[in-house]
Amino acid sequence: MRSRFKFLCGTAAAAILAAGASAQQSATERVQVSGQRPAVQNLADRQVYTIQSDLQSATGSVSDVLRNLPSVEVDVEGNISLRGDRNVTVLIDGKRSAMLAGSLGEALEQIPADHIEKIEVITNPSAEFKAEGSGGVINIVMKKNADADEAAMVRLNVGNDGRFNTSASGSTKFGRYTATGNISYRRDVRYRTGDTQRGSDQSQTTKAKNFRQGLQLRLGAEAEFDARNTLAATLFSRFSTGRIDRREFNRVQSGSYTFGSERLGEGLRKRDNLEVSLEYTHTFARKGEELRFELQRGFDWDNSRDTYTNLAPLSATTQDFLQTRSSEIETEARADYILPFVDGSLLKAGYNYQDELNDYSNFGRYFDGSVWTVDTDYTNRFVVDMTIHAAYATYDRKFGPLSVLAGLRLENTTVTADQRTLGSRIENSYLDLYPSLHLTYDLGEKRQLRLNYSRRINRPDDEDINPSYEYHDAFNVSAGNPYLKPEQTDVIEAGYKYTNDMFDTLLTGYFRRTRNGFTDVSRYISDTVVLTTRENLARAINAGLEFTVNGDIVKDLGVRFSTTGYYNEIDPGALALGKARSGLAWSGKLSLEYKITPDDQFQLSGNYTARRLTAQGYRLPNFTANAGYRHAFSDTLAGVVTAMNLFDSHKDKTVLDSGAVSEIAVRHQSGRMLYAGLVFTFGGGDGGRDEGEQTGENPE
């Protein structure tokens, strides 16, 4: 593995340097595009954000950029939600990817934002997309770097607390062949604290330092055999390691006595990803007619080890050792056909096969002060095999000012969950139809009405259905529910879009009705320990109104503003969580971009989320702010300074007030993250004065 890794890195570096050398010889002075404004495209079925205008993309991760996008929320732990719904499908170039294996939040924090061309936020996807994700779809489109014959870019960023990241990317063309590559290294440190008060007799304080580093490589090649046939191949690989140092203080009050204990944790992480994909495209004689085949196979190997030392007065020192090893193999094949008609209408049809085979092995030992004993509650092996066959068709046609995009998707899912240690094997198979309809009516004078509908599904994750215990700390354990049903959501959206020479505005109302929705349920299993599991709600209703504005306030001052007000109603049904709950909430995001001089740009952004409802309580308000400054030294060299979590205010505060558990928990990402970096570009790449310069024109 090490020799193959050196070979891949050497190949990428050689390709990038070769492209850079050739590009440097042929580089010519580029023309600056004037009139910067946020690059946002309000398309009929999605919002498209070209993130180069966000200065956080120069130094941060994909998670850092997502925090600034309308409709998207990222919490302290990296969990993503769309309009308050955490059941979101995240894709890379329209497909699932090994880049996102394991914890989605951790994976997104490891992907450099400067490798991203744009992000598509699709709150109501058409039948062309997989039906997975009741909250919607976030599609991350990677840079291809193939606009010029040769192009290359090098970035170097240094941050506080030992943070560091660097990347290099390049592309070259020779005849009908194109080669692209990027390689990056990222070292990140995150400090997190937590305070939990459970009732009046339990409290817990935690402090953790999370160190991660990763080397990521992506290589691509494309061959145009002739004017109608193209073959493309992509190789992705990532090698990452990490360490978590955790300190935990626990207090239990019993009558007039107070018992205190301390727990010290040391965790080691190692994760490797490998993905290979092939894509063949054939274009027919009829303009726009196309047939495309894709084949992709991804691998993820994870190994985590945690050692805990338990200290308590007048008691022997004890230890816990927990190890988790997993392998995930995903195979995907798809075929898509596009057929245009003479009347301007368009038919798309396709088939998609997906298979996921995931194998998890957990091993635990306990040291009572004299001997090590196997922890049978934690030790287990769990294997999940899921296969999905899907077929879809969409039809797009204009009737005067009315545009209609109608679609239907059929998905057959088979899941086998085999808890081999407990001798529990559950098989589930279901067939469902997922219709979609997108209507757009052009009112003229750059005004437009929209009405959309889709049906979505959210399948349980593997950990959601594994019944074995997972220990988090002295007071908290979790377990999956093997009988958890998929949740089904019907989504309706209505919108009004208006565009003038300065602003793009979009007003959208939405309504979501969910059956068998997932929720976390916490219950005491002893006097001090709470078990958290996943359960199905009877139903949940979400409705809201969202308003976004993108444009220029005055010359050289751009603004991106969004606000959402929403209503939530949760009916727990047979769950012992009390009666149905409902509530109102709102959130807002504001980003200002000021072009001080042709070479200097300043950006300030802030995000606020008000109190939100949960099944057993609510989340309290949260506010974060970021800032950035960019100076272009020349057409090929720029410097960037960014500050994230500017006021050290990024925290999540959750209250549980059901009859089962009474708790207040605060999770805080402590400390500001500061970066200073350089961007060097040569050839046809974007950099220097050009990077982030956008006209803001909508291609619709």
Image (cartoon, rainbow, N blue to C red):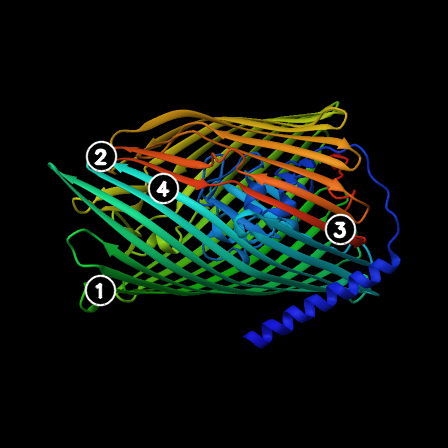
Residue density around tag 2, few if under 14, some if 14–19, many if 20 or more, within 10 Å: few
- Using a 10 Å C-alpha cutoff, classify the residue at mark 3 as few (fewer than 14 neighbours), some (14 to 19) or many (20 or more): few
Q: Which residue does the image show at 75% across and 44% down from the upper left?
A: 691
Residue named by callout 1: 367
Q: CA distance from mark 1 to mark 3?
A: 67 Å
Disc 1 from disc 4: Cα separation: 27 Å
Quadrant in the picture for residue 16: bottom right
Question: Are circles 1 and 4 on residues that touch, CB within 8 Å?
Answer: no
Residue projecting furthest to the left: 255
Look at label 1 and name its amino acid: Phe
Residue 118 in sight in this render: no
- Of the two numbered discs 3 and 4 in the rendering, the one whose residue sits closer to the viewer: 4
Q: CA distance from mark 2 to mark 3?
A: 64 Å
* Residue carrying label 4: 194
Q: Which mark is residue 199?
A: 2
Mark 1 or mark 3: whose residue is earlier in sequence: 3
Q: Are marks 2 and 4 in contact (CB under 8 Å)?
A: no
Mark positioned earlier in the residue sequence (1 or 4): 4
Please state the horizontal and vertical placement of residue 241, each as a whole percent of the image. Answer: 48, 62
**Circle 3 sits on which residue?**
288
